[in-house]
Image (spheres, rainbow, N blue to C red):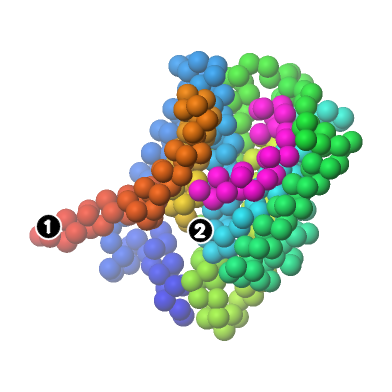
Amino acid sequence: MSAAVESIVADSPASAGRPGGGRRPSALLRAVPAVVVLVLLAAAPFVLAPFATTVLGRILVFALFAVSLDLLVGVTGLPSLGHAAYFGVGAYTAGIVAINVTSEGVVLVLVAALAGAVAAAATGWLAVRSSGVFFLMLTLAVGEIVYQLSTTLDSVTGGSNGLYGIPAVRVGGTALTLAGYVYWFVLAVFVLGFAAVWLVSRSPVGGALRGIRDNEPRMRSLGYSPFRYKYAAFVIAGAVAGVAGGLFAVQVRLVTPSEAGFTTGALALLAVILGGAGSLWGPVLGAAVVVLVRDALGPTLEGHGPLVLGIVFVLAVYLLPRGFAGLAGVSAAVRRRRSRRTP
């Protein structure tokens, strides 16, 4: 078995009790920080102003989009430049259904996920057969095609003016008009979406994806089908990106072609790099930095938000080559060294 697969097995929770595996905290103890963060997020509308609550909701939406991209970039080793296409497809689908059929929240999330999955399945069949620069160019082309379609199909998407007039999302027939209620809906869907990607990443499928990322020829020689695994990851990532797009339409109630454009995909990739590819929780922090600089600080910087993001990115590349997740790895290494020195 390849060194990559062996390292995956060694790092899995099952190896905690093996000789040399090191002492790891129990699953319950590891879950405490996540529960604390979830409680704080749920309580946010009680202490934040409506605008701040809305910004926090946008962070969650963009974070879910970045997590879906991390499944491709960090877990599978497929850096995509056109992932915003599935975000835009999900957003437009949810908006069109809300205007013409129903604005029930569960329905909008499901149709957005289905639309993102179908679009990813249709385009990924060709894209995942390539790698490297060719994969980058194919995904970039897909993103540009979706962007151009959203601009030219005026009768469906509203063209350059965008799809507006999206009604307030409903839950159980009740319209959510207050910022706090919309935020809680976004938070609930974010938790479900993040949990789904996390389960895939921690499953045997996720282990196979990491093995394919690290040494595809060796995994093929072991009997794995890299195409099938990468294609499945591509479709799952497209579905989760579609859900994020649907949440965007629910919260903003306006969808423009820029949601499917290159800039949106590049910002998601920036969030993944800032947070640490492959960690899943790292891109959430990266997304928070991107949204705060773009939406919260941008208006006060006289339009220089992109410049600040560029500076942050350059500093992160030099100071945090593994992103925010790398800091956790450094602290864990320090603890291991101290434990070895302790008799």
Q: Position of residue 166 (x, y in %)?
A: 77, 26
In what element is the residue under mark 1?
Answer: loop
* Start-end of magenta stretch: 248-270
**Mark sitting earlier along the chain (2/1):** 2
Residue placed at 36% from the left, 47% from the top? 315
Q: Main secondary structure of the magenta part?
A: helix
**Residue marked by disc 2:** 74
261 inside magenta stretch: yes
In the displayed structure image, the side of residue 264 where residue 334 appears, left or right = left
In what element is the residue under mark 2?
Answer: helix
**Residue marked by disc 1:** 342
Establish if 250 lies above or below 308.
above
Residue placed at 39% from the left, 53% from the top? 317
Q: Can residue 199 be seen in this snapshot?
A: no
In the displayed structure image, the side of residue 226 where residue 321 appears, left or right = left
Q: Position of residue 244 (x, y in %)?
A: 64, 40
Badge 2 local density, few (<14 within 10 Å), some, or many (20+)?
A: many
Residue placed at 62% from the left, 28% from the top? 185
In the displayed structure image, the side of residue 139 where residue 331 appears, left or right = left
Residue closer to the observer: 257 or 109 = 257
Residue placed at 78% from the left, 31% from the top? 161
Q: Residue furthest bottom?
A: 221
Q: Amino acid at mark 1?
A: Thr
Establish if 151 lies above or below 217.
above
The disc at residue 179 is none
Q: In the picture, which quadrant includes the C terminus?
A: bottom left
61 inside magenta stretch: no
